[in-house]
């Protein structure tokens, strides 16, 4: 095992018990289970890697209505990792207030929860560490607890565990600047609030950053997500490793269907894309279909693709203009319909194009005596 002074696990924004109301009931339940499983996997990792401290930088719960089972699971997991000290900095989604989980439940002795919105600290003389931080006490917080702060110079390693927003001094979610963090000379600052995949920065002697959420919950949080394991050496150097934890990943991909005449051709292209990107049962995919397809082609469900993924959303941005030359010359009603819609089909405005494409598909289907696919 490496020579190190301190091993830190850093996560935030788990948002346990998120309702996932956009998914169907079964998949929503499955995603809530995923969040709990991701949390449990992280706790197992904390034990296996023998982390000294776990910094949980807020939004552990999605809101105040966390279920009893989830809270009990969390407490059990903390109890199961007795050698690790868990520091919790409540965030804007799970602020500490009378009646909140943090104020009303009894947490094990190895759990330390910040209770005030001003800067405070937990001192661990056994580890030679001070952990600074604060709590959201309501869903917003406009003051910056670091603004006039000074840290006690006592030779201990200085950590920060906090939910805050470093992006704007006007943020209603605890606006803190990166300059404040660096000026105060924290060795490692574990931040929470920004969900996208995390990144740790290094300025002067300070390592700081957001872990990101360990499990994405929407198409704003794409890709493989995780947490950080940070070792602090005796010289103060930090080694920060990103550790993937997400059970599922959100992905957005574009599939060019130019030239597709039949549904089978379109299905084949979509399958090839899924294959090449290695999407599978862990993937929640938003598929954006583009390109000029045959006017008669109606794009319905993609059953094969759906069966291979956790969930599939399709956005159809194709235009029914492939091989339109034939239709332009067509002397029947079909040709007349096509010629009438052609200016709109070639419009620079996406919405106009889509409306004209729908009109053409409907019209052609009616003239053929068929019903178009899901439009
Ligand atoms: Mn959050």
Image (cartoon, grey):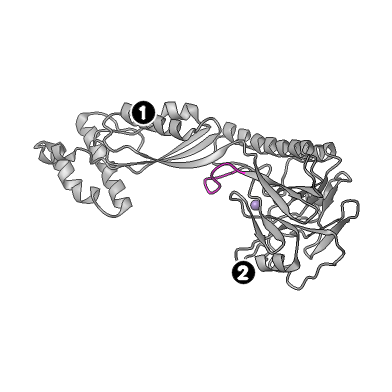
Q: Helix or strand or loop: what does disc 2 sit on?
A: loop
Residue 15 vs residue 181, the one in the foreground: 181
Outermost residue, bottom side: 148
Give 321 or 44, whichever is nearer the viewer. 44
Assess whether residue 222 is covered by the magenta stretch. Answer: yes
Residue that label 1 marks: 268
- Percent position of residue 369, x then y: 22, 29
Name the image quarter holding the N terminus. Answer: top right
- In the rendered image, the vertical position of residue 262 relative to residue 250, given as above or below: above
Horizontal arrangement in the rendering, residue 357 relative to residue 301 (left or right): left
Q: Secondary structure at mark 1?
A: helix
Q: Residue at x 74, y 55 (%)?
A: 237
Residue at 24 percent across and 47 percent down: it is 345
- Distance in Å between CA atoms under marks 2 and 1: 49 Å
Q: Reading the chain from its start, which is encountered first: label 2 or label 1? A: 2
Residue at screen point 73% across, 40% down: 67
**Label 2, on which residue?**
170
Q: Give the x, y percent position of residue 73.
A: 77, 37
Residue 367 visible somewhere in the drawing: yes
Q: Residues within 10 Å of mark 1 (few under 14, many from 20)?
A: some
The magenta segment is 216-225
Residue 193 lies, in percent from the top left, at 65, 55
């Amino acid at each position: 095992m490496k020579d190190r002074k301190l091993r830190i696990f850093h996560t935030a924004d788990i948002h346990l018990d998120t309702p996932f109301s956009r998914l169907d009931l079964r998949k929503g339940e499955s995603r809530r289970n995923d969040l709990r499983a991701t949390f449990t996997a992280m706790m197992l990792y904390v034990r296996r890697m023998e982390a000294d401290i776990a910094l949980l930088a807020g939004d552990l719960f999605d809101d105040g209505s966390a279920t009893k089972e989830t809270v009990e699971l969390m407490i059990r997991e903390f109890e199961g990792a007795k050698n690790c000290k868990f520091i919790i900095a409540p965030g804007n989604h799970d602020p500490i207030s009378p009646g909140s989980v943090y104020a009303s439940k009894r947490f094990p002795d190895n759990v330390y929860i910040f209770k005030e919105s001003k800067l405070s600290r937990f001192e661990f003389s056994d580890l030679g560490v001070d952990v600074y931080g604060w709590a959201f006490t309501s869903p917003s917080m406009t003051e910056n607890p670091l603004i006039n702060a000074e840290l006690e110079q006592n030779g201990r390693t200085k950590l920060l565990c906090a939910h805050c927003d470093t992006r704007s001094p006007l943020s209603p979610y605890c606006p803190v600047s990166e300059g404040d963090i660096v000026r105060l000379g924290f060795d490692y600052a574990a931040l929470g609030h920004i969900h996208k995949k995390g990144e740790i920065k290094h300025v002067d002697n300070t390592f700081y950053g957001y872990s990101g959420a360990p499990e994405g919950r929407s198409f704003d949080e794409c890709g493989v997500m995780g947490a950080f394991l940070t070792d602090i050496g005796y010289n103060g150097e930090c080694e920060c490793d990103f550790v993937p934890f997400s059970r599922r990943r959100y992905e957005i991909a574009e599939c060019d269907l130019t030239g597709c005449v039949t549904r089978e051709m379109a299905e084949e292209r979509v399958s090839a894309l899924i294959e090449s990107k290695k999407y599978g049962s862990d993937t929640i995919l938003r598929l954006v279909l583009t390109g000029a397809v045959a006017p008669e082609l109606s794009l319905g469900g993609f059953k094969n693709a759906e069966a291979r993924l956790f969930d599939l959303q399709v956005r159809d941005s194709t235009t029914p203009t492939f091989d339109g030359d034939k239709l332009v010359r067509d002397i029947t009603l079909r040709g007349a319909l096509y010629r009438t819609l052609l200016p709109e089909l070639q419009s620079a405005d996406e919405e106009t194009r889509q409306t004209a494409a729908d009109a053409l598909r409907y019209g052609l289907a009616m003239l053929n005596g068929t019903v178009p696919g899901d439009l």
